Amino acid sequence: MATSSQDSSSSKRHFHWTNKVATEDTEASSTTPNEDDKNGRSGIKTHVSLSTPRKKKLPAAAVSIARLRSAVSSFRKSRSSLPFGLGSRVIGTLFGYRRGHVHFALQKEAGSPPAFLVELATPISGLVREMASGLVRIALECDKPKAEDHNKKGTTVVRLLEESTWRTYCNGKKCGFATRRDCGDKEWKILKAVEPISTGAGVLPAGNEVEAGPDGGELMYMRAKFERIVGSRDSEAFYMMNPDSNGTPELSIYLLRV
């Protein structure tokens, strides 16, 4: 036991001695520096002074990158909120009264405002007859702006879905013209009435949600999901996605600017 106490006391003395020696060496080195130490310290100070501006640039660069990312994200959000920000899958609805014309609407989602709404000169009864064949191709064509109009200052290129007048072809036969329409209260009520329907066709009786036709007739509709293919800024195609390939008429709609 005595031996252990002596060893511990000697170890403590050795520990304090090493600390004392280290402290004295530190003080000696700090109080009596040579020329090399001065040059080394001056070099260290010079290096620190040069590296300080670089460290200050990093936060500025990071802030600028963050601002850029924020601007890009806000731009994407604003673009996605626009009705023209359609994706590769859209909802298409054809509707019209029995003795009226065909209306065609494209929506990004079931409850979103239509990004594209046109009234075709084709009667709904004629479209039903074409669909009986099981293969329907509807092409809507409009004219490109003239070169002199395109070169004028202040003129902007209109989006394809914003064109106002179209020539209509149904299975290769000319069917008059189609006109772009704004979604009014009447059209919006119809789209809200068929909103729960993802895919299907039928008749909506006149009532609180749907107004009666000019002749008191019922409203016919067909609603389905369409695959959107963008060829260029002057051409887009919409293909009806059939849940099954038996008995369901295939429908394709093309928008062309020629």
Image (spheres, grey):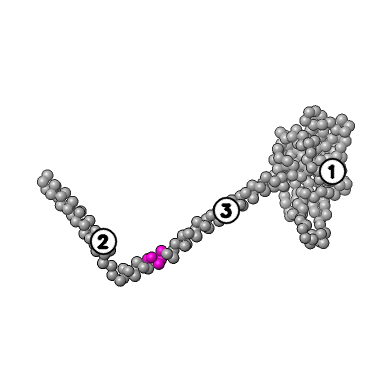
Mark 3 surroundings within 10 Å by alpha-carbon count, few (fewer than 14), some (14 through 19), many (20 or more)? few
Where is residue 38 drawn, in percent x and y?
32, 69
Query: As shown in the figure, which amino acid type bears the numbered disc 1?
Result: Leu
Label 2 sits on residue: 26
Label 1 sits on residue: 120
Q: Is residue 91 left or right of residue 41?
A: right
Q: Which residues are magenta?
A: 44-48
Between discs 2 and 1, the one toward the N terminus:
2
The correct choice, above or below, for 244 with respect to 15 in the image is above
Q: Is residue 190 left or right of residue 8?
A: right
Where is residue 174 drawn, in percent x and y?
87, 48
Q: Residue at x 86, y 37 (%)?
A: 100
Q: Nearer the viewer, residue 61 or 133?
A: 61
Q: Quadrant of the C terminus?
A: bottom right
The residue furthest front is: 31
The correct choice, above or below, for 135 with respect to 219 in the image is below
Evaluate if marks 3 and 2 touch, with contact meaning CB atoms under 8 Å apart: no
Tell me if residue 45 is in the magenta stretch: yes
* Mark-to-mark CA distance, 3 and 1: 47 Å
Label 3 sits on residue: 67
